[in-house]
Every structure is written in C-alpha cells, then in structure tokens.
Amino acid sequence: MPNTVPSLLSMLKELLSEISVSSTSAQWDTGNIKVIEKLSGWLTTLGFNCEIMPLDGNPNKANLIATLGNGPGGLVLAGHTDTVPFNEERWDMNPLTLTERDNKLFGLGSTDMKGFFPIAIEAAKDFLDKPLEEPLIILATADEESSMDGARQLAAQGAPKARFAVIGEPTDLKPIRMHKGMMMQAVTVIGRAGHSSNPSLGNNAMEAMHVVMSGILAFRAELQQRYQNPLFEVAVPTLNLGCIHGGDNPNRICGQCEMHFDLRALPGMNNDELQAELQQRLQPLAEQLKVNISLRALIKNVQPFEQSADSELVKFAEKLTGHSAEPVAFATEAPFMQQLGMDTIVMGPGSIDQAHQPNEFMSTSQVQPAVNIFKQLIANYCL
C-alpha cells in the first residue's frame, strides 16, 4: 500500500533506539542526524516536502522542515529531537528501547520529546488526501536541551513561515502561553595570590567575592520588588547562586574565585538589559576592592516568552482542551518561533515531571487524546 509508514508505537520505538544526546559536555554530545533522517523518510513517504538543514559547522546535527501543502500562513507542529544525557544503570529498563508497562511508554525521550513526533505524524495522516488551504509543517529541531542552536539558526534564516506554531513539549495537553527566560552566568574575581601569613602580600579574591555575592543578592531583591507576575507559581524573577570555586590551599591568599548563577526573568524583562545592569553594578565594586570582576555567559540566553491571552491560537487551544492557558517554569523554543512571526503556544502530551530522569515515560492515556487535538488544530488552521 502506498503512503504507509510504521505504526505509531513502531515509530516511537525506532526513534528511541537512536541516541541523540545534546550536551554542553563533549563526552556526552552525539548529534541528532539519524533521528532527523528517520523522520524525513517517513514524512517523505507520506507526501511531505522535506528539507534537512544541517547546523552551521556541525553536519552531525540538523533541523528538519517537512511541509504538506502550499501557500501562506498555515500551522507548525514543532518539537526537538535531542535528549539529555542519561545513566543507564539508574534505569529499570533499557532507556534506548520502548518498554510498555502499567499503561506507560518508557524510554529516553518518550515524553521529552521524541514521543511527540509519531503522534503528530499519526494526526497528519488524516489530511494526506485533503486539499489544504494552508500548509501543515512538522518541524524537528536540534540541540534544544543545551544551546537551542537549532531554533536559533531557524530564526536567523527566517524559516519556516506560518501563522501559528504549537510546540509539543510535555504539558499534559494543557495550553501554555508564558514561560520565564533563562540566563546562566559566571562571575569571575581575579585578585592577587600571596603567602597567607601576610595579607598585604596579596588581594584575596574569595573575600572580594563575598562582597560581589552580597551585591548580586541585593540586585535580586530589587528585581523581585520591581517585577511580579501572580500567574506564575513563583511570581518573581529568580536568581540562584549555583556553585563557587576559588583558591587552592589554606595557607595561600586566594588569587581567583568564580561563581555560577542562574537568572530566570519574567515576561516583560529582557536578558540583555539585565546583564548590562548587573555589569554596571559590578564595576564600582571592582574599583573599590581593587580586583578584576568579569561576567561571561555559560549558555546562550533564552528570552522570556509570552503569547497574548486574547490570541486566536490561545483561545482555540483553550476551547479544544477545556483548560485555560497557563505559565510554566521551564524554558522552550517558543521565543524563537515568535521571532519568525508566528503566534505560538506550548502544548503536548506527557508530563514535564517525567523529563530528565531515569524511567522517563509517557502515559498511554494521553496518546490518542493528543492525536485528536492535533487533528483538530490541523483541520482548523490548514483546511
């Protein structure tokens, strides 16, 4: 029979079998090209026009834009093909295959978020022989779990173009229209080492860092006074002091100290402006303490995301699901879809509570409802 692809669960099993870890650590990072090639093969068989777009400088990583139909506008169903690193010994089953047990589908990426693609493809099958007024685009990206370079490259290239985008991250099929941004920074203090018996022989970077930390915490308090959004469970921007490294011996004045922190900005705030403001606050401290203080990004910033509550897409998703659109704490590729000019929501099967941990699973009870919801989205925005 023409236009046939494996069953939904067979597709999921094949996707789970391909390692596609994305990590800032080279020892874990693998690339996603095999997953992209599988998706492209299936979607080409179904009549989609598939374009594989390698990431700049890395042919082992790619995005996929698969388009059914022509014309302006249309709907993008988007997901990422990479997973986080994993420790196989902590799993109760093989993380690289599909295990069905207790009405759950176990496997690395089953819910975050390889499981999205077979569901989206299953929904698309109903429309292969129907004349689409506007195109259906299935988008698969690379490196969401580390740099988001796949989505960044798409935004820079200006593709794909559509009116609406639904990112199928695990939200228990509830529409999400807001999330906080993400920036992770290192602040480095360089003083002068010396023998601890005579403090005048050096300038202790760890002691200077104590002052810097107090300044950063004061900055956090000011931000939390200036910005609140009661729709979020944590209604203020957060700034977490995550780790610190400095010095090498008790009898040596610490010459260098570095601290890493994470700042999650609310919608309406801008990461670049926050970094500039923080830099301005640190410069006087450097002069006062006679040390060098520098900031550097540990990851590329992700801006906060907000889609208007009265957006047509938000309203339709609320009607479909019976749930009001909500905010979430985790970051997604949604800001980059908005940069491409699309009304965007995040909504997909599975729970974020199962992501990034051993024995990750998607409940089987969410599979068919997700297929049905995606069918209704396609019918509304493409027919």
Image (cartoon, rainbow, N blue to C red):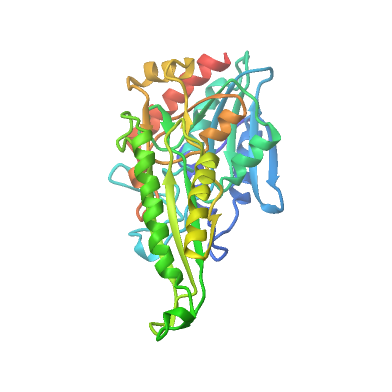
Question: Measuring 50% from the left and 31% from the top, which residue is drawn there?
Answer: 120
The x and y percentages for residue 147 are 56, 49
Q: Residue furthest left?
A: 102
The quadrant of the image that shows the N terminus is top right
Quadrant location of residue 236? top left
**Residue placed most toward the observer, 118 or 84:** 84
Where does residue 297 sit, x and y in percent of width and height? 55, 53
Q: Quadrant of the C terminus?
A: top right
Q: Is residue 105 visible?
A: no
Can you say whether 316 is above or below 249 in the image?
above
At a point 68% along the width and 37% down the height, the residue shown is 156
Count of residue discs: 0
Residue 134 placement (x, y as % from top left): 62, 16
Q: Nearer the viewer, residue 45 or 300?
A: 300
Residue 285: x, y in percent? Answer: 47, 57
| Residue displayed at 54% across by 62% down | 25
Q: Does residue 355 show up?
A: yes
Along the line of sight, the residue nearer the viewer: 38 or 285: 285
